[in-house]
């Protein structure tokens, strides 16, 4: 059962609670679940930041916060990776008060710079055979999907890198 489902169940129980002791216990449970939900994205974004730093993605580029948020969204809900153009980019554009085309271009630029300046051995460790020198850099979707898988693996306590 997901955190959100547990929150909904606890809130429903709170509404139906018949005595003060049950209400207080359910209030504590709702607070705990909400705190857990707040911590997860921050942890994920910290992991994403570390990964991008290790890959050599410059933090000063406009695409950096877009990529961090995009990877966090995809790690949270895979629906976004199946609908990048009409789902992920518009979502990011709303959050960052810009246009979807600018989000797409900024992410593409960050990947280009990372691929041209980054350490090839580290890039190879993260992306393995999914990317080759002949093939060139990954697409925005490939980049975001791969790193979201690494983030999810690290949140579970695994490394998530290619061997």
Image: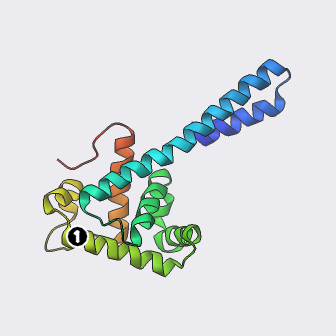
Binning the other alpha carbons within 10 Å of mark 1 as few (below 14), some (14 to 19) or many (20 upward) gives some
Q: What colouring method underlies this structural image?
A: rainbow
Identity of the residue furthest to the right in this view: 18
| Residue 133 seen anywhere in this rendered image of the structure | yes
Q: Indicate the position of residue 63 as horizontal and vertical percent values.
A: 40, 71
Q: Indicate the position of residue 12 as horizontal and vertical percent values.
A: 76, 35
Q: Reply above or below: 11 against 149.
A: above
Q: Reply above or below: 62 against 54.
A: below
Name the residue rendered at 38%, 38% in the picture. Answer: 156
Q: Indicate the position of residue 136 as horizontal and vertical percent values.
A: 20, 74
Q: Is residue 53 left or right of residue 135?
A: right
Q: Reply above or below: 26 against 68.
A: above
- Determine the secondary structure under disc 1: helix
Q: Is residue 69 left or right of residue 117?
A: right
Identity of the residue furthest to the front in this view: 60
Name the residue rendered at 30%, 39% in the picture. Answer: 158
Name the residue rendered at 46%, 75% in the picture. Answer: 103
Image quarter of residue 55: bottom left
Question: How many dots with numbers?
Answer: 1
| Residue 2 seen anywhere in this rendered image of the structure | no
Q: Reply above or below: 154 against 88.
A: above
Image quarter of residue 116: bottom left
Q: Is residue 94 left or right of residue 158?
A: right
Residue under label 1, please give it: 115
Q: Indicate the position of residue 24 as horizontal and vertical percent values.
A: 76, 24
Is residue 54 or residue 144 the one in the foreground? 54
The N terminus lies in quadrant: top right
Name the residue rendered at 47%, 60% in the picture. Answer: 69
């Amino acid at each position: 059962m997901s955190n959100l489902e547990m929150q909904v169940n606890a809130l429903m129980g709170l509404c139906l609670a018949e005595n003060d002791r049950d209400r207080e216990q359910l209030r504590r449970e709702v607070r705990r679940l909400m705190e857990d939900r707040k911590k997860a994205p921050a942890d994920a974004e910290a992991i994403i930041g570390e990964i991008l730093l290790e890959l050599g993605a410059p933090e000063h580029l406009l695409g950096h916060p877009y990529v961090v948020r995009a990877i966090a969204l995809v790690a949270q809900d895979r629906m976004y990776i199946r609908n990048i153009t009409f789902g992920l980019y518009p979502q990011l554009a709303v959050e960052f008060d810009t246009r979807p085309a600018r989000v797409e271009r900024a992410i593409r630029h960050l990947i280009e710079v990372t691929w041209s300046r980054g350490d090839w051995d580290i890039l190879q460790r993260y992306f393995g055979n999914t990317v080759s020198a002949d093939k060139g850099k990954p697409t925005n979707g490939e980049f975001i999907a791969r790193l979201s898988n690494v983030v999810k693996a690290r949140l579970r306590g695994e490394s998530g890198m290619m061997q």
